[in-house]
Amino acid sequence: MEIIQRYLHAIEFWLPKSQKADIIAEISEDLHSQMEERQEQLGRPLNDAEVDALLKQRGNPLLVANRYFPQQSLIGPTLFPLYLFVLKVWASFWLLPAFGLAIIVQRTQHPDLTWWHALGAAGDWVWGAAFWAVSMITLTFVILERANAKTHFLENWNPRKLPPVRDPNKVSRFSSATELVVNSACLVVFICYASSLNIINGPALRLTLAPVWMNFFWGFLAVGLLTSALSAVNLMQPYWTSARATLRFLTDAIGGALWCWLMKANVIHELWIAKAHDSRGTDLSHMINTWIAWTFPYTVIVIMVIVAVDLYRILRVNRKNTRGLKPQVAAA
Amino acid sequence: MAGPDLFENLRLELRRGSLVLAVLVALRAEQYGYTLRKTLADHGLDVDENTLYPLLRRLETQGLLVSEWREENKRNKRFYLLSAAGDLILKQLLAEWQAIDSSLTSLVKEEQHGNHPTLPARH
């Protein structure tokens, strides 16, 4: 029957070369045996519809041929979860921030663009790099898969080399001490040099800030003192509590809001350079104010990331408190 | 929630390992593909052709079966038979299967007599 020949030919196309004839002969024999049995049951030759049904039941030629190949995959089930994890980490820490940044850059550089157009332009900008990165990650895992199939390197591991269990709510004493020292040093410098509007007052250069600066001075001073106090408490009791996590969130949020305001406040009032014309100083101060204002979107991104981390910390601490879980490493 | 799809998947998974054993047992006597499929079906093991023929080919490549093309009823058919290596492996697999069967039977009996440890209540 012609339809059987066509079916066998369609399967043959996909089969491995060396076994084509053998496999086709066997499938052909099986189909004919099946048809013979059916004809005996019916007492007549099969009609076209019945032959079609038999072939349909056997399956799509491509799928039938595929069953004769060994299972193949670029990245197997052992490494696939790790591959997905790496892609997720990459998407969270590179792709999304880069995309957000690209949108803001587009909007800043081309203020006439709508958000939708900025979104499209950012997509174009990020697409190439994203494609390249995903290809590289995939290629790396394909190589790892091949290497693991040959050397079984994943089976050579040492339990003693496993990383220690880290309690995310524990505050490192080193980081608290560093934070305290750096904060205190910055506060001393800040109080010494930024408590008046005349930041620089020399014979060759004078820099005067706008009166609004005093709001920033007291605001940043308060935030700095609170942060130092928090670092000191964390140094003594190195474990995040709900109250301390909330205080860190508030100081970061207030500090961030102050920074954002500062970016837009045209804080440089006057810049005087001895060897330059007065108008040059005015131009320069205007240029610095404009440049500071231009960095506003980037500041917002950084602050949003910091605030998001702080909020996550509050959630984590509260979740742990609700569950009443204690570190169980010692018990184990 | 466990549904019919999940049951079907688990059933297929359970049968997949047993199928190799069933084929090896059935091929202690020489048979060609079509009659082998019928033999298995008669014993309650319906096997799809697209599963059986590639499996026979794989078992032959592994040296557990031997085959030859021969004419029967005016048609060329490929006859399969358990090889010496296949016979040895079959004995080992049968012992393993019997051990699994015995362990499962013992577990099920224990369950039926309520002799099983219970998990502490969660608060």
Image (cartoon, coloured by chain):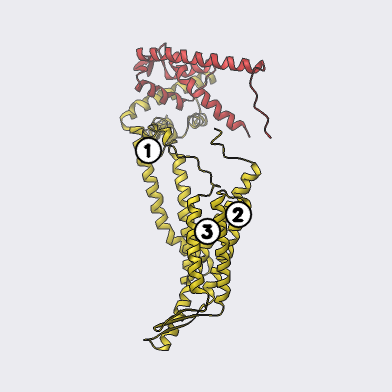
Query: What's the amino acid at mark 2?
Result: Arg
Sooner in the amino-acid sequence: mark 3 or mark 1: 1
Tell me if mark 2 has few (under 14), some (14-19) or many (20+) residues whose alpha carbon lies within 10 angstroms of its own.
Answer: some
Q: CA distance from mark 3 to mark 1?
A: 35 Å
Query: Vertical placement of A261 versus A49: above or below?
Result: below
Tell me if mark 3 has few (under 14), some (14-19) or many (20+) residues whose alpha carbon lies within 10 angstroms of its own.
Answer: few
Query: Vertical placement of A162 versus A111: above or below?
Result: above
The residue that label 1 is drawn on is: A145
Label 2 chain ID: A
Q: CA distance from mark 2 to mark 3?
A: 19 Å
Proximity of marks 2 and 1: CB atoms separated by less than 8 Å: no
Q: Of tags 2 and 3, which is closer to the observer?
A: 2
A321 on left or right of A86: right
Q: Colour of chain B?
A: red
Query: What's the amino acid at mark 1?
Result: Glu
Image disc number at residue A305: 3
| Point 38% across, 15% down: residue | B86
Front residue of this view, candidates A184 and A214: A184
Q: Of tags 3 and 1, which is closer to the observer?
A: 3
Which image quarter is the C terminus of chain A in? top right
Q: Of tags 2 and 1, which is closer to the observer?
A: 2
User: Element under label 1?
Assistant: helix
Figure quadrant of residue A212? bottom right
The residue that label 2 is drawn on is: A244
Query: What's the amino acid at mark 3?
Result: Val
